[in-house]
Amino acid sequence: MNNLQEAINNIRIIDGHEHIDMYEVRKERNIDFFKLIHYLESDMISAGMKRDILYGKSPLSDKEKAEHFLKYWDKTKNTTYALMIKDAMEGLYNMEDWSVKGLLALNEKVKAKTNDRSWFKEVLNDKSGIDLAFTLVQTTDVDFSLFRPILFLDFMFRLRGPADIEFIKKKSKMAIHSLKDYQAAVRVIIDNLVKDGMTASKLGHAYWRTLYSQKPTYHEAEQVFNRLKSGFINGGLSQQEAMTLQNFLIHYVIQCSISNDLPIQIHTGHQETSVSRNGNIITNSKVTNLIPILAEYPDGKFVLLHNGIPYHQEYLSIVKNFTNAYADFTWSYIISPTLAKQLLHQTIEMVPMSKIFGFGGDYNSVEGTYAHQKLARKIVGEVLTEKTEANIFSEQEAITFAKRIFRDNLIDFYKIEV
């Protein structure tokens, strides 16, 4: 190992994006090996596996799950998602026997760690070198010694029926009779979340509609809201009918985030079939659809997640030119290490280093994050070694760059204390 790679391996990471539930939730859900496979489930579904067959209320016994897993493991073990599971299980649980018997033994080990309160700290802090992780678990009730909360705010603008308004009414504890009342309730909710420690907003609407948002007038949005509120709509509005109101509220949520000095994370690019369940309409997530928003709010701080893959070339141009747009490598390394390496080379050449965030595991378990950070450090080390060999960076400049994208930029941008 060269000195540069060793220095990168020793950087204490600030992890910009996860979906890791707290210990109590993991214990309540009795997380076992089959519930840890996360992204690999998408590849297995793509290879023909029945959705949810290993999850939730699966009718299969553990032995049958192991047999089913191995059937599709044989079809998917070439992908990076599979390699991450393999690396995590071998590195954390000493897994060697990828047979039914071996999987059943591994399953018991995972369940034992699910009941071990110290496991999160051991894996994140000690084994992964992560000081702090931002996690999206729809609550601010997190362990602040390890995490900072970020919340999806889609529930504030994904209005299709009266029940969606009722949810905001209950959450805000405010009466809602008009669009103006609804806006006031949304602001109260956001203000309270900030007081409780929410570090950033997250907009995930690319999974269920286009990122493109026109800017309707209040009157146009109010007309739709009043239809929705009237209660005479059987089954609610269609997505097309609701778009005007949704667009208005997307702008409003952004405005509330900016007034609270909250960064705004936005999903761009690739979608997971295990999450989207909607046929993966990838064109919903084209990063160029965000240009009107970026132009409208120059005082916003927009973190464009996942490098916009497969729209990464347009993405690079956008984060290069818009002062309020930031490049984020969350998830990218495990989508494709080859592409992530190419993208990092180009990002170094195009984007100011202060605008680059180098790691977000984007996993729902600490095990996945452990494997992902190892891969991320390796790819960053390879890229920076090539940059030093090309005399783009000195070794010390390369180390400084790595420290910025893995740690310092996130501390400064999100204004956190570690």
Image (cartoon, rainbow, N blue to C red):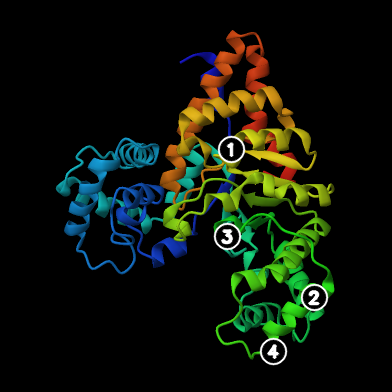
Depth order, front residue of 113/193: 193
Residue that badge 4 annotates: 230
Instruction: Name the N-terminal-most of marks 1 and 2.
Output: 2
Q: Are marks 2 and 3 in contact (CB under 8 Å)?
A: no
Q: Is residue 186 visible?
A: yes
- Distance from disc 3 to disc 1, alpha carbons, whole Å, reads 24 Å
Picture residue at 64% right of the left edge, 83% below the top: 166
- Distance from disc 2 to disc 3, alpha carbons, whole Å, reads 26 Å
Checking the image for residue 329, the label placed there is: 1
- Distance from disc 2 to disc 4, alpha carbons, whole Å, reads 19 Å
Classify mark 1: helix, strand or loop: loop
Residue 375: image location, x then y, percent = 46, 32
Q: Is residue 197 above or below residue 129?
A: below
User: Which amino acid type corresponds to the residue marked 1 in the rendered image?
Assistant: Phe
Q: Is residue 96 above or below residue 114?
A: above
Instruction: Name the N-terminal-most of marks 1 and 4.
Output: 4
Residue that badge 2 annotates: 184
**Mark 2 crowdedness (10 Å alpha carbons): few <14, some 14-19, many ≥20:** some
Classify mark 3: helix, strand or loop: loop
- Distance from disc 1 to disc 4, alpha carbons, whole Å, reads 44 Å
Checking the image for residue 142, the label placed there is: 3
| In this picture, residue 69 sits left or right of residue 204 | left
Residue 276: image location, x then y, percent = 48, 58
